[in-house]
Amino acid sequence: MTAFTLGFRASRPLALLAGAGMMALAMAAPAWAGDADVVATVDGKPIVEADVKMLEALMGNALARVPEASRHQLLVNVLVETQVLAEAGEKAGKEASPDVQRRLKWLKAQTLRDAYVHDVVDPQITGAAVKARYDEMLKQVKSQTEIHARHILVKTEAEAKAIIAQLDKGADFATLAKAKSTGPTGPRGGDLGFFGPGRMVPAFDKAAFALKAGEYTKVPVETQFGWHVIKVEEVRDVKPPSFDQVKVRLRQRMEQQKLREVVDELKTKAKIEIK
């Protein structure tokens, strides 16, 4: 027993078979492989380095908790144990099962689908195309302003006017909010954070965005929640995200759109009957 095996429970590779989706059943033994590429054999059938790389990619996040130095040997163990189980299943006549045949048919179709998308569809979305789409979207983005505001919410107009009078005399807005506001933001000085146009109810929104940084409403603002006194702490222009921030997500969206186009075109050429 190797030191690696001692570091893991004996069942670990077997447990990972489920995470790998058992996809290695028919893929662990290529028709030919050079001796230098062979990492293990099962009853004379070679398992090669390419199989390890394939399984590593397919398992993805399932390997996140496995130390990097141990991953290769773990993947080899998974492939070996998969092949051992696959041969046992074959000897037991499981390949003839209608259910197994259906699953093998699906796995073949799935593999061919993924290969076609990876090799034919995705390469159509070039880096230049993604950048061009970003530049196009950037032209359509309207500049937007956000404000950082506070408010004091009270039940009556008279209370709101009294608060404005105190502010006119130099009272601290946040201190008054903590003492007098009935809203949920009262304990934190009425702080609403940053928000853009349209995020608040219309009357509040209109009054708030009419203020400059450091100003507060001189007239109480009525909404369905009560009477507000609003102060704007800061005004800032919102910049669109940079290309580097969105290029991965944008590429994925473009690839999905292209895939949809390709599928729709292929469906028009296929004879499809859904019963």
Image (cartoon, rainbow, N blue to C red):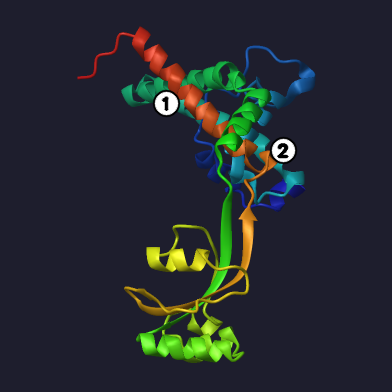
Looking at the image, can residue 80 be seen?
no
Say which element carries label 1: loop
Per the model, the C-alpha gap separating discs 2 and 1 is: 30 Å
4 in relation to 269, above or below = below
Image spot of residue 197 (x, y percent): 48, 57
| Label ID, residue 231 | none
Q: What amino acid is labelled 2 in the image?
A: His
Point out the tag, 2 or 1, that comes first from the N-terminus: 2
In-image side of 182 versus 187 (left or right):
left
Residue in the picture at 43% in, 64% down: 200
Q: Quadrant of residue 94?
A: top left
| Label ID, residue 92 | 1
176 in relation to 110, above or below = below
Residue in the picture at 37% in, 7% down: 269
Q: What amino acid is labelled 1 in the image?
A: Ala
Tag 2 residue: 72
Q: Residue furthest right?
A: 36
Q: Quadrant of residue 129?
A: top right
In-image side of 117 versus 39 (left or right):
left
Q: Quadrant of residue 265?
A: top left
Residue in the picture at 37% in, 21% down: 101
Image spot of residue 61 (x, y percent): 60, 44
